[in-house]
Amino acid sequence: MTHTIVFLLITLICLNESSMDLLREHVHLNWCSVNKSINVQITSNDELNCQCQATRVLDGANEKDGYIHTPGIGSHKLHAEAKSWNDARKICSEENAHLAIINSRAEEAVLVGILKNERKHIRKANNKEEAFLGIHDMFKEGEWVTVFGEPLHLTGYEGWSPTYWGGQPDNKDKNQNCGALIYLGVLTILYPNQVEAQTKLRLCSNNQTVSVEISSGGMNCQCQIAPQDPVVRDGYIHTPGIGSHKIYTDARNWNDARKACNKDDAHLAIINSKAEELLLVDMLKRAEKSIKNALNQEEALLGAHDLYQEGEFVTIFGEPLASTGHVHRAASYWGGQPDNYGGNQNCVAIINQGGMDDVNCRDKFAYICELPIPC
């Protein structure tokens, strides 16, 4: 793509997946997962005891706050005032939604229709042909993931445009890292300061044990969580009241560490309390002598970054770091952290003396994975 202005503003579409057709018989939801929500039925087994009672939802309950509900696909909303991608992401989150993630050709057609119908109302945009989606390759160039960190190819839709501005994605000017939908259909990429659609699930919050609410085609399923057995797996250490963690001593860069945790059905650790911080510090100290190929043995990578906006730290799930329940910055480590040393420290690590440090995402460190709490 060729643009005369480096930072473009475009419109955005939000998706509210709480109203998607999520309820199906005999399908199991094992873990809290913000985007693995298609065809979900809450059941009971040895690890999970969740009782559901379905009741009718009032007509029109899915169509609120400007969201357009399409049976079998979801509820979407286009914001006509253009924003940057990160600002659009936050706006959707404030609406309990997220930037839209396309899961099928049918959903693509719905979003294209919304964009075409609303183009004349778009304001403050350099380009009225596109709207942001909840995908990016900020973790690694060319490696596209959703706002929830899942590979794009797992969404069920990966329709890059072969003809728009010579074919997409093209990473024009080497700084196009956000995805957008073209009003003609198919995907393109844009500069981070562009706006796109948002979507969010009303399911279990990541890293929290909460009630589950799933809406499905006019049905509302509310689940209460019963006591569960500890989550124990392949070297993970379970600490009652805190969670299950594992430190890997074969150092990796942040993105590779993130993917390695995902292979465990886990995620890079997110600290939610002082007790959890002390636990991870102790794990790091005990493992220091075993750490290999690392920039240093004093730190281990965590599930947080400020890749979306410098100085605005979020978890790997896009939640503000301040909302995790515990933020301890290392005030004395190398003059105080975070310092964005060299202008390219965008990933977070825990230090063996306690507190967090910002590090270069390309440097290799030990890393700590955390199993999600089952719900």
Image (spheres, grey):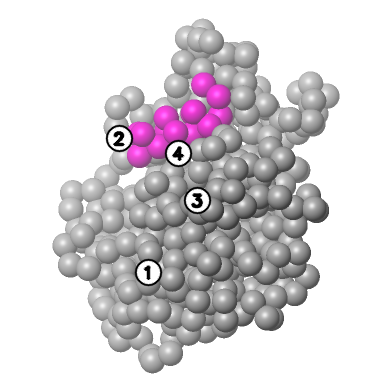
For this rendering, which residue is in front, 88 or 161? 161
Please state the extent of the stretch shown in magenta in the rendering: 252-265
> How many C-alpha atoms fall within 10 Å of the one at disc 1: few (<14), some, or many (≥20)?
few
Residue at image location 75% in from the left, 43% down from the top = 311
Identify the residue position indicated by label 4 in the image: 267
Q: Indicate left or right for 156 with 130 as reference.
A: left
Identify the residue position indicated by label 2 in the image: 232
Q: CA distance from mark 3 to mark 4?
A: 34 Å
Q: Indicate left or right for 248 with 317 as reference.
A: left
Q: CA distance from mark 4 to mark 2?
A: 15 Å
Specify the amino acid type for callout 3. Answer: Pro
Whichever of callouts 4 and 2 sits on the residue coming sooner in the sequence is 2
Q: CA distance from mark 1 to mark 2?
A: 40 Å
Circle nearer the viewer, 4 or 1: 1
Instruction: Give the quarter of the image for residue 96.
Output: bottom right
Q: Is residue 260 magenta?
A: yes
Residue at image location 67% in from the left, 26% down from the top = 360
Identify the residue position indicated by label 1 in the image: 106
Residue at image location 68% in from the left, 69% down from the top = 128
Classified by dominant secondary structure, the portion drawn in magenta counts as helix
Residue at image location 25% in from the left, 76% down from the top = 53
Residue 162 — which label?
A: 3
Q: Is residue 150 magenta?
A: no
